[in-house]
Image (spheres, helix red, strand yellow):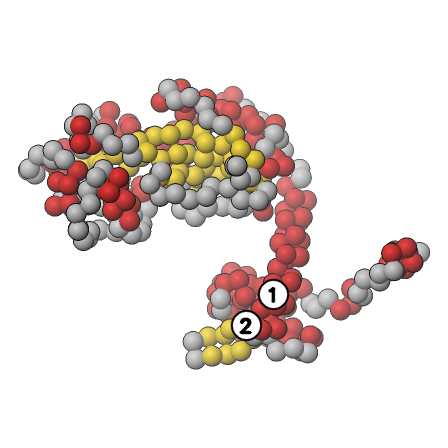
Amino acid sequence: MDRSAVDAGTTGYSPPSRTTIPPFEALRAFDAMARLGGIRNAARNLGRDHAVISRHLKTLEQWTGAKLIERTPTGVVLTEDGLRYHKQIATAMDAIAASTVDLMRSGLHNHLYVSCSPGFALHWMSRRIGIFEKLNPDVEIELRPSDHGQDTRFFEADVEIRFIPCYRPQAPSAVGVRWQEIITVPIVAVASPEYLDDKPPIVCPSDLIGHRLLHEHDFNGWAQWLVAHGVYDDFDLTGTRLWQGHLTLDAALCGRGIALMNYLVADNFIKSGQLVEIGKGCPQFQTPTEGKYFIFTRSDRWDQPLIRRYRRWLVDNLNSQFSRPKLPIYATQPS
């Protein structure tokens, strides 16, 4: 018996016919265009020619009988009908993607996909992940450096590790995600001995303003760090922008200036003498400037055996290195 007929007889509701659903390629093209803000961006995302995307959009408009996009001198934009339609179908598209990945990953019990920042991956994780592999020889690890947070809800990663400076507050939680603060580490200014050799002594944080400061994607990191150290002068920061922390680290190692690094990444370089911690032992530099490492997973996978093993291994290794206490665990947003 037709299931829809049964539902209609018991609930009084008859769902729309599946024949009203447009071709899925047209829906994918429309969703990508709406999310990414243009036909060419959608084409790159889906690996299609932009003319193909345009044809799919035309097909969808013919199917629905509604004008969904308008072409303007600056590109295509959604009409009111287009905005409303995309808002309604986006949740369904996400659900289809998540369910499909769930199905694809259902057999990958011995595969762990870990996402973290490039600096942490290169200077800490890659040097120690072999220890975890020896303890778990049946596990296949995929370690992917990324500057952009991965969405664990949709299996962009099984585990994400993220560092957030305390002077740059961000809400680390999201619905459906469980997280834990792993460790708190200092954020310090570092430079090579060669860079400092011919420079005047740095005795207080304000002395840094006259130096060559190395920046990531903007000047905010240094500005916020200086303010946290009591430097409120009207300063206009300039200097090299390198976009990634491991590139500012490399520039500091090459004597190109002073970089901000979290101590977890800089530790080995400071101990080896390749870098000098600016202001170490100086009272003016003792204002706490720290950051926290967080680990994220989907809430429903937090206690999956492989993720639980990895999480405990990571927390134990980090805290044994820095002798910090373990911190509380939260499910989604903390109260």
Question: Quarter of the image containing the N terminus?
Answer: bottom right
Is any atom of residue 48 visible in this view?
no
**192 relative position to 218: left or right:** left
Task: Tell me which numbered mark, 1 or 2, is placed earlier along the sequence.
Answer: 2
Label 2 residue SS? strand
Specify the amino acid type for callout 1: His
Which residue appears at 14% of the width and 33% of the height?
Answer: 193
Q: Which mark is residue 78?
A: 2
Q: Is residue 208 above or below residue 1?
A: above
Is any atom of residue 206 visible in this view?
yes
Residue 197, horizontal then vertical, whole percent: 8, 35
Give neighbour class at mark 2: few <14, some 14-19, many 20+ (Cα, 10 Å): many
Q: Is residue 36 above or below residue 130?
A: below
Which residue is more in the foreground, 252 or 202? 202
Residue 195, horizontal then vertical, whole percent: 13, 38
Q: Which mark is residue 86?
A: 1
Which residue appears at 69% of the width and 74% of the height?
Answer: 64
